[in-house]
Image (cartoon, rainbow, N blue to C red):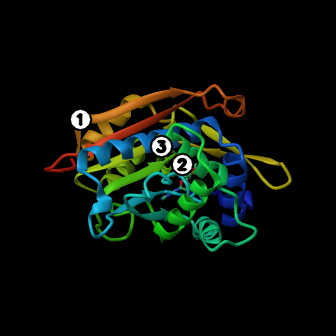
Amino acid sequence: MHLIAPESGVTPSEFAISYLNSSYPVGKPYQDTKLILNFVAREIKGLRERLGDPQEKPAYPTALEIGCGSVPISCASVCEDYHILQAGYLSAELHLIANWINGDPGAHDWNAYIAEALKCELFRNPTEDEVAARTKLLKEKITLSLCDITQEYPLGTASEFPLATSFYATEVAARGRDDWYQIIKNIGTTVAPEGTLLMAFTSNLKRYTLYDEDGESREYPLYAINSEDILTALEKAGFNPDEITVERKKITQCELTDDGITEIILVAAKKSSRAVAIR
Ligand SMILES: C[S@@+](CC[C@H](N)C(=O)[O-])C[C@H]1O[C@@H](n2cnc3c(N)ncnc32)[C@H](O)[C@@H]1O
């Protein structure tokens, strides 16, 4: 498994817990997370305006979040309009999400993150009741599944969604440039013609650091993504080059810059109606 080197002695469960504790501290979302939550809230509002109010339709469509890891809140703004199939690579990661959905007392506390997503939607601080209502809705709308984005069909069979999202997963899964291009194509297979893909990437970062429960640090490798490759990779994966937006966002918060993150890249792309990927 590329994600955790066998010689590290780290179990999938230890990895999943240290990822949460290092990247999603309770009560204080990092700057990059706030940028992603704001991006998703804005894009969902745009989709709603373009497509009409899905609440009026009898059935909710399903969106896919692929490579979700142990993080259930990136799509907190998606759940009013869509069911969410959250697909992760490690069952240990999905267990942590299931613990939260089931109200396990030891589960990660995502309150501040859901409040942040609502703040991005409402342009004001949400009330406690609003946070509780969104938390309940999000828990109801999530279904969990395993996935592997290194496979042509990451969910095991060909499946297409009107909306797919993936945050910080491709750089972890890829072993190099060709591999990364292939992974973008694989993720592209999950997006229906004229569907939307929302993604976030670390920019040009070669490694990231996680801390275990004793505060001991461990470094993990990343494929360093170049923003110029993103357009080409998405076009090859069947996305319309005229409907791809790539935003580079500077990171200034010191916890992250200490870790080497100086920029993230946020991408929204629409699949062509013909949707022919170049093999
Ligand atoms: C940096 S974490 C990002 C998690 C989450 N999406 C987030 O926004 O914080 C990288 C994730 O990529 C996932 N990943 C690694 N290899 C993968 C693969 N082959 N298929 C799907 N996900 C993979 C890992 O399980 C891990 O949860």
At a point 19% along the width and 46% down the height, the residue shown is: 272
- 78 vs 138: above or below: above
Amino acid type indicated by mark 2: Val
State yes or no: Cβ of the residue under disc 2 lies below 8 Å from any atom of ligand 1: yes
What secondary structure is marked by label 1?
A: strand
Q: Residues within 10 Å of mark 1 (few under 14, many from 20)?
A: some
Q: Determine the CA span between mark 1 and mark 2.
A: 25 Å
Q: Nearer the viewer, residue 248 or 1?
A: 248
Instruction: Say what amino acid the circle numbered 3 marks.
Output: Glu
Q: Residues within 10 Å of mark 3 (few under 14, many from 20)?
A: some
What element does badge 3 sit on?
helix
Q: Nearer the viewer, residue 269 or 187?
A: 269
Report the residue at 67% width, 34% height from top: 256
Of callouts 3 and 2, the N-terminal one? 3
Q: Which residue is mark 3?
A: 121
Q: Residue 155 shows which numbered tag?
A: none
Residue contact at pointers 3 and 2, CB within 8 angstroms: no
Residue 197 x %, y %: 34, 48
Measuring 57% from the left and 66% from the top, which residue is drawn there? 90
Q: Which residue is mark 2?
A: 172
Write down the residue under mark 1.
241
User: Residue at (54%, 46%) from the top-left corner?
Assistant: 117
Answer with left or right where residue 165 lies relative to residue 195.
right
- In the rendered image, which quarter contains the N terminus? bottom right
Outermost residue on the left side: it is 274
Evaluate whether residue 150 shows in this view. no
